[in-house]
Image (tube, helix red, strand yellow):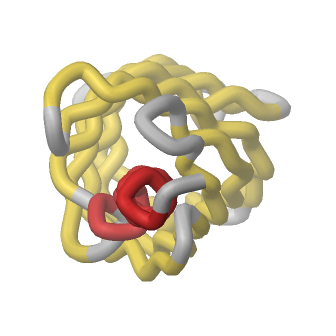
Amino acid sequence: MKPTYFLAAAALALAPAAHAEGLGAEVDYGRADGHWGTEIGAGYAMGIGGFSLTPGGGVYLRDGDTKLYGRVEATYTLPLSATIGAGVRFSGENTRPYATLAMPLIPKLRAKANVGPKYYALGLTLGY
């Protein structure tokens, strides 16, 4: 393999790491704590080589009520493709593990889905 091709391949493989760092915001609609509602949150991604750990939190708006929630996600971004991983959501007395999948729409904007026991959400992520 020519050195130029090797450097180009290495740059493509490391490209997701550049996108996995920093602040981000999410807006999701889903079912949590037995009710349908909207999650509005933010987090900070810390990543290296495609892997990322993202703690975050926000508010869950449902039936005219507001609840705070926190979450932690561990993900891996496939080069030039999807982000897959697992997370844990904390809200009140409920702790819910979930799987997560995000697909890029445009740079820094992704469609995202979270699915777990008694927790489902679909939305958009900006940043990270």
Please tell me in which quadrant of the rendered image residue 93 appears.
bottom right
Q: For the view shown, which residue lies furthest in the front direction?
A: 2
Residue at 47% across / 77% down in the picture? 47
Of residues 128 and 89, which is closer to you in this image? 128
Residue at 16% across / 26% down in the picture? 106
- The image shows a total of numbered marks equal to 0
Residue 51: x and y in percent read 60, 67
Residue at 57% across / 59% down in the picture? 91
Residue 65: x and y in percent read 30, 39
Of residues 76 and 95, which is closer to you in this image? 76
Left or right of 13, for residue 65: left
Left or right of 40, for residue 34: right
Of residues 57 and 81, which is closer to you in this image? 81
Q: Quick one: quadrant of the C terminus?
A: bottom left
Please tell me in which quadrant of the rendered image residue 108 appears.
top left
Of residues 112 and 57, which is closer to you in this image? 112
On the question of residue 76 being in view, the answer is: yes
The answer to whether 94 is drawn above or below residue 70 in the figure is above
